Structure formats: structure tokens, C-alpha cells
Amino acid sequence: AQKVTQAQTEISVVEKEDVTLDCVYETRDTTYYLFWYKQPPSGELVFLIRRNSFDEQNEISGRYSWNFQKSTSSFNFTITASQVVDSAVYFCALSEAEGGSEKLVFGKGTKLTVNP
Amino acid sequence: NAGVTQTPKFQVLKTGQSMTLQCAQDMNHNSMYWYRQDPGMGLRLIYYSASEGTTDKGEVPNGYNVSRLNKREFSLRLESAAPSQTSVYFCASTGSIWSASLPTPLHFGNGTRLTVT
């Protein structure tokens, strides 16, 4: 069965520090899809990134970057020069379904607090 | 652009009462989902509907029923609420159109905070 582990329950950093959120997944399928979502204090869930299992290229979007390594079943998320607005709960998620979104399994989340 | 709309936003029930959580999307999406979020547990799938007319159980379906009323609407019903169903409920939807071998992401509603006393 698919499983997502976010071992870091809470992380606290000072503004401008870099921070990496870890995500380790388990799946028996060779085709799968990985996601990151952000949940700010207001409570809504915001999609950040998606990746399929055949694409191991790292991705950078502004201060955000993602490192996908199939060899270690990890899909880690790094925020460079963190800001107070980055404070949120971040969820990593995995889907094995053909459609990619059915039965999305989430990790338990990492609460990031960025202090001024 | 409303996206995914959930009603109500807040609800307090007494044990044994019933209620229906409503969800509607205006993005012409085929698939819709109900998740619950509990502290320290992440989001867990209750039920989903891959297309109009079909529904399937997720990870935690016990105590719930769903109805895919039409392509836009997907409701979640608690027949006899229990304190263990105190949670934040999220409805989500997604289309079936792929882009560059990537699945379409889930679009979430803003959630319903349910308390059962």
C-alpha cells in the first residue's frame, strides 16, 4: 500500500534561513505521482507542485525548489531565504492511480513557523 | 470563479444527529472527493467519485454516505454523528485532462469545521 512519511512534525526557523521539508514515500508501482500542498493559517489548501515518477529533474520556482530522488524514495522541498509568509503546514502526497489524483494519500504534514 | 464551494463553513451537532455537507464545483471536473483533516493526521480520503454516477470508498468511509447528485455536486452525509467525526472536512475536485504527462491537481474547497458533542 502507498504511504507518505513526513518525519518532521514542526520546524521553526528565523526569517532568511533556508529550510528543507522532508518527504519519504512508499509504493509498489513504477508509475506514480507526487505532490506538495501548502495550508496557511487561513486553512485553505494550495497546490504547489506535481511530479511523475519518470521525471527526476529537480525543479526551482523562485525561492522554492524540489529534489526528487527515486533511489531514496524522497521528494524533499526546500525554501530558500524563508519569509514570515511561508509559515504554514506543508503536505506531501502520493497517488498511484492512472488518473493521477484519485486516492491521493497525504503525509501528516510539517508545520513550518518562520519567525521575524 | 468560485471553484469548489462547500456549505456550511461551521456546524455543531449533538451525538446522533444527522446532517449533509454540500459541495459544488463550477470547473466541469469529472472527479470529486471528500477528505477529513484531523490534528496530526494529515488528510484522509473518505469517499470519492471518479465520474458522475459512480462513488467509491476511500480510507475512512465508516459512518458516512455520499451522493454524486450531478457532475457539479457531491454531498457527504452523516446519518448518526459521533464525537469521533469531529473534524475539518474538505471537498476537492479534479479534471481528467493531462498536461505533459502530469495529473491535474486537486482543487480544494475552504473546508467545513464540524464539531460533534
Image (cartoon, coloured by chain):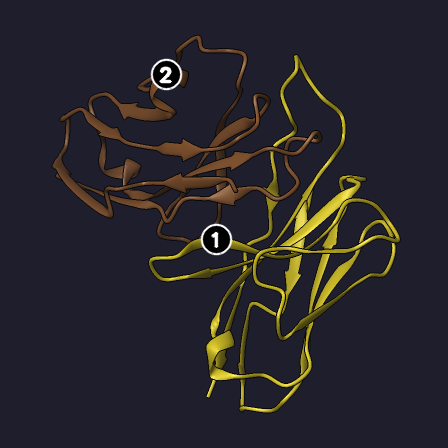
Q: Which residue is mark 2?
A: A71
Mark 1 belongs to which subunit?
B
The residue depicted at 38 percent of the width and 24 percent of the height is A73
Q: Nearer the viewer, residue B70 or B16?
A: B16
**Numbered disc 1: secondary structure:** strand
User: Is B10 positioned to the left or the right of A85 in the image?
Assistant: right
Pointers 2 and 1 within a single chain:
no
Letter of the chain shown yellow in the rendering: B
Q: Position of residue B3 (x, y in %)?
A: 67, 44
Residue A106, compared with residue A65, is above or below; it is below
- Total number of numbered discs in the rendering: 2
Q: Position of residue B7 (x, y in %)?
A: 65, 66
Instruction: Name the amino acid type tagged 1.
Output: Leu
User: Is A67 positioned to the left or the right of A30 in the image?
Assistant: left
Can you tell which mark lies on residue A80?
none
User: Is B42 positioned to the left or the right of B13 in the image?
Assistant: left
Residue B85, compared with residue A11, is above or below; it is below
Q: CA separation, marks 2 and 1?
A: 26 Å
Letter of the chain shown brown in the rendering: A
Closer to viewer: mark 2 or mark 1? 2
Q: Position of residue B26 (x, y in %)?
A: 77, 45
The residue depicted at 66 percent of the width and 51 percent of the height is B33
Instruction: Name the amino acid type tagged 2.
Output: Ser
Q: Which residue is mark 1?
A: B43
Residue at the top extreme, as displayed: A57
Mark 2 belongs to which subunit?
A
On-image quarter of the N terminus of chain B: top right
